[in-house]
Amino acid sequence: MRSATTTAAAVTTTLTAAAGLAAAATVAAVAVGRHAADAALRNEPGRPLPGGPRLTVHSTAADRVALTLSLASLRSGTYALAAPGVHAVVGAVLPDAPHDPDTVVRRLVGVTHGTLAPGARVRLTPQIHVGDPRTALGLDHADVDVPGELGALPAWFVPAARDTWVITVHGLGGTREHPMVVMPFLNHHRLPVLDLAYRGDLGAPRPPDGLGHLGASEWRDVDAAIRYALRFGARRVVLHGWSTGATMALLAAERSALAGRISGLVLDSPVLDWRTTLERLAAARGTPAALLPLAVRAAEGRTGLRVDRQPPGADPAALRMPVLIFHGPDDALAPWEPARRLAAARPDLVTLRTVPGAPHGAMWNADPAGYEEALRRFLTPLM
């Protein structure tokens, strides 16, 4: 028969082992959460956004391309097809063109570089221009450096006659090439454009932790761009941002000491619900559903989002300038409900243009003419 002392020792050993296993499991879970958070937030300029399927090129002709049939390949509007070493622009779906049942034929606007060969695997992206404003659009520009808190921020400046400048800021999955979609429109209306690369972008300083913060720290680079514009001739500025670039613009309007010189905001697919976007990014990068809460908590801790004063746009009463929002219910990365609430709370200042059928950051692509007309109406009083 075992003695009471022996039994107690055995129980103690078992409890100690169980506690050790629990502690090890907790450490492992935290490590997994941290890894998932870093995968979701790591700065990789031009990294494709999650959620877009890869499409196969089935055939090409002088002015058309046949792609795999999918919801993505059926989207209306103008997009790019991108793969390593390949970039092409496609327009409208051509339903009357001869095609197999498992394909979609779209108008092929042009191949920017590479070869769009049958069998190529490509992604549909809203970034339709590559290069710089001169090579891509024929617009004269200057390469300038904006002094930022982490170092020089490269930017393209496209001059024009007016003293209201538009500062453009790309977002998730993009580079400063993305805002070139609106440059011809802005240049036609004689609005100077300062197109900013910010921390983490190619040629810009790396953030200290190597991670993107969904705009929570990057907005200070927009603040630096405002200072630069005012120093070099702007009397006022309009901030035009996409995705987290839109978040940065809104945060700058809320927090910058120069907010009084911002005459308007254009927010395309703004990320206004950080937690949901973090969850969706982590899920798209392969994090199992059971670990998503850990990934979100780790991301909040890594970036400081959790302890931030409040999410962007949380206080509609704080708005002091007109805002135009382009967003829609089909955005799988940044839910549009916060944009709807902001517009409903401040109908005197906020205009929401709903764009159905458009993925994240692609509101212009889904309806270029409608987008630019809404932009014209909004900007005309601000010029």
Image: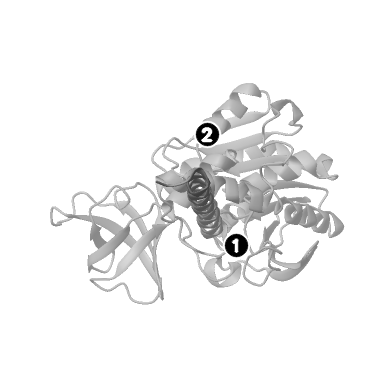
Q: Residue at x 62, y 57 (%)?
A: 212
Judging by the rendered image, the residue that carries numbered circle 2 is: 353
Q: Residues within 10 Å of mark 2 (few under 14, many from 20)?
A: some
Disc 2 and disc 1: Cα gap in Å?
A: 24 Å
Identify the image quadrant of residue 317.
top right
Residue 167 placed where, x, y %?
69, 53
Q: Quadrant of the C terminus?
A: top right
Q: Is residue 303 above or below residue 142?
A: above
Q: Is residue 265 above or below residue 73?
A: above
Residue 240 seen in render: no
Judging by the rendered image, the residue that carries numbered circle 1 is: 176
Q: Nearer the viewer, mark 2 or mark 1?
A: 1
The secondary structure type at the circle numbered 2 is strand
Number of numbered discs visible in the structure rendering: 2
300 left or right of 69 in image:
right
Indicate which disc, 2 or 1, sits on the residue closer to the N terminus: 1
Viewer-closest of 383 and 280: 280
Identify the image quadrant of residue 210.
bottom right
Q: Residue at x 64, y 22 (%)?
A: 345
